[in-house]
Each structure stands twice: as C-alpha cells, then as structure tokens.
Image (tube, rainbow, N blue to C red):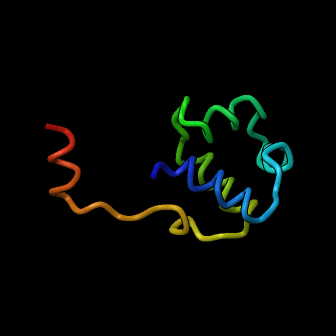
Amino acid sequence: MPVGEKIKKYLESQELSQIRLSEETGISAPKFNLTLNRKRKMTFEEYELICGALKVSTSTFLKPKKPNETQSKAS
C-alpha cells in the first residue's frame, strides 16, 4: 500500500482531518489531498513534516525494500 494511503487510513483511524494536518505542515490542502489519494507523489520533506505533525517516526508508514525487490520492479 502506498505511503499516502497509509497516512490517509491513519488519519481516519485517529479521527484527524486532512485540513488540520495541512495547516500544521504548511502543505496546501489541495496538494495534501492529491497526495493522499495517489494522484501526486509526496516529497521526503513533506513526509518528514507529516510525521512530525503526527508525532510518529518516519518509519511508521514505510517498509524497507530489499534491493532485489526494487530491481525487479524497475525491469
């Protein structure tokens, strides 16, 4: 599952609004919504801001990939 989707599910489970998180991070609401709905890629800086605002580790929504997983998808 993409990171944006994981964040969206987390927000729903914690009953947090996208608007509030948008305001806390400084990421515009439209840009934030596009990111959570897989219509735009998130930058790592945005990801850090989101994790910081949620007070969670940056490893919360990421699962490390093994090198062979990355290479096989790129082929």
Q: Quadrant of residue 7?
A: bottom right
Is 29 in front, or is 10? 10
The picture places residue 8, in percent across and down from the top left corner, at 65, 51
Q: Tell me how many marks there are.
A: 0
Q: Quadrant of residue 33?
A: top right
The residue sitting at 68% across, 54% down in the picture is 50
Task: Look at the picture and state if 25 lies above or below 13.
Answer: above
The picture places residue 62, in percent across and down from the top left corner, at 46, 61
The residue sitting at 56% across, 49% down in the picture is 5
Is 40 in front, or is 10? 10
Task: Look at the picture and state if 31 lies above or below 22.
Answer: above
The picture places residue 20, in percent across and down from the top left corner, at 86, 49
Q: Quadrant of residue 39?
A: top right
The residue sitting at 84% across, 43% down in the picture is 19
The residue sitting at 53% across, 48% down in the picture is 44
Task: Look at the picture and state if 11 lies above or below 75.
Answer: below
In which quadrant will I find the C terminus?
top left
Residue 17 is left or right of residue 36, and the answer is: right
The picture places residue 71, in percent across and down from the top left corner, at 16, 47
